């Protein structure tokens, strides 16, 4: 039975080893646009997809909200660009003391804790 299992495993092997996720976070720039509207520009290398860049920007937004004494943020948009292995994200969030309307809201304290646990740098 073990030989059969090993044989099946060999058939499903694509010959490609899964690469470890080793991101290099290269900085966050924040810009207060107006009132509670904030832009976050992030740069990183080693992203697997746009989702990793989005996570980095979300971590920046969560920490920024906490620094400003707010508990929540709402994601408005994120543009992600990749060139030569350098991933850039341009994200805009609103920050607020109470849970804002909308579907893409974050609890800044919860997100910041998750970012710290996952080793994602913040502002």
Image: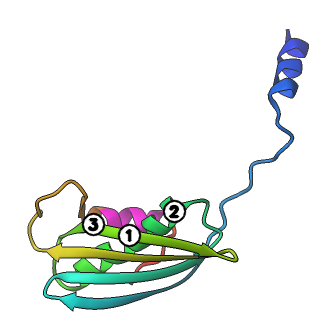
Residue drawn at (53%, 73%) of the image: 81
Q: In the image, residue 106 lies at what x, y percent? A: 25, 62
Separation of residues labelled 2 and 3 (CA atoms): 15 Å
* Element on which disc 2 rests: helix
For the residues labelled 3 and 1, say whether their Cβ atoms are less than 8 Å apart. Answer: yes
Q: In the image, residue 41 lies at what x, y percent? A: 42, 83
Residue drawn at (26%, 74%) of the image: 93
* Element on which disc 1 rests: strand
Query: Mark 3 = which residue?
Result: 75
Left or right of 50, for residue 46 = right
Q: How is the image coloured?
A: rainbow
Left or right of 101, for residue 66 = right
Q: Is residue 116 visible?
A: no
Q: In the image, residue 90 lies at what x, y percent? A: 41, 78
Query: Mark 1 = which residue?
Result: 78
Q: In the image, residue 32 lies at what x, y percent? A: 25, 90
Q: Quadrant of residue 75?
A: bottom left
Q: Earlier in the sequence, mark 2 or mark 3?
A: 2
* Element on which disc 3 rests: strand
Left or right of 29, for residue 8 = right
Residue drawn at (18%, 76%) of the image: 95
What predominant SS class does the magenta segment belong to?
helix
Mark sitting on residue 50: 2
Separation of residues labelled 1 and 2 (CA atoms): 9 Å
The magenta region covers 111-118
Q: Quadrant of residue 105?
A: bottom left
For the residues labelled 2 and 3, say whether their Cβ atoms are less than 8 Å apart. Answer: no
Q: Nearer the viewer, mark 3 or mark 1?
A: 1
């Amino acid at each position: 039975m073990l030989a059969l299992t090993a044989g099946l495993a060999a058939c499903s092997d694509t010959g490609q080893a899964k690469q470890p996720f080793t991101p290099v976070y290269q900085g966050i720039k924040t810009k207060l646009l107006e009132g509670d509207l904030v832009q976050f520009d992030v740069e990183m290398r080693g992203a697997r997809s746009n989702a990793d860049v989005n996570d980095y920007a979300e971590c920046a937004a969560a920490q920024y909200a906490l620094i400003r004494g707010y508990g929540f943020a709402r994601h408005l948009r994120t543009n992600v660009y990749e060139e030569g292995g350098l991933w850039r994200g341009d994200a805009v969030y609103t920050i607020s003391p109470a849970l804002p309307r909308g579907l893409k809201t974050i609890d800044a304290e919860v997100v910041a804790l998750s970012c710290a646990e996952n080793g994602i740098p913040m502002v």
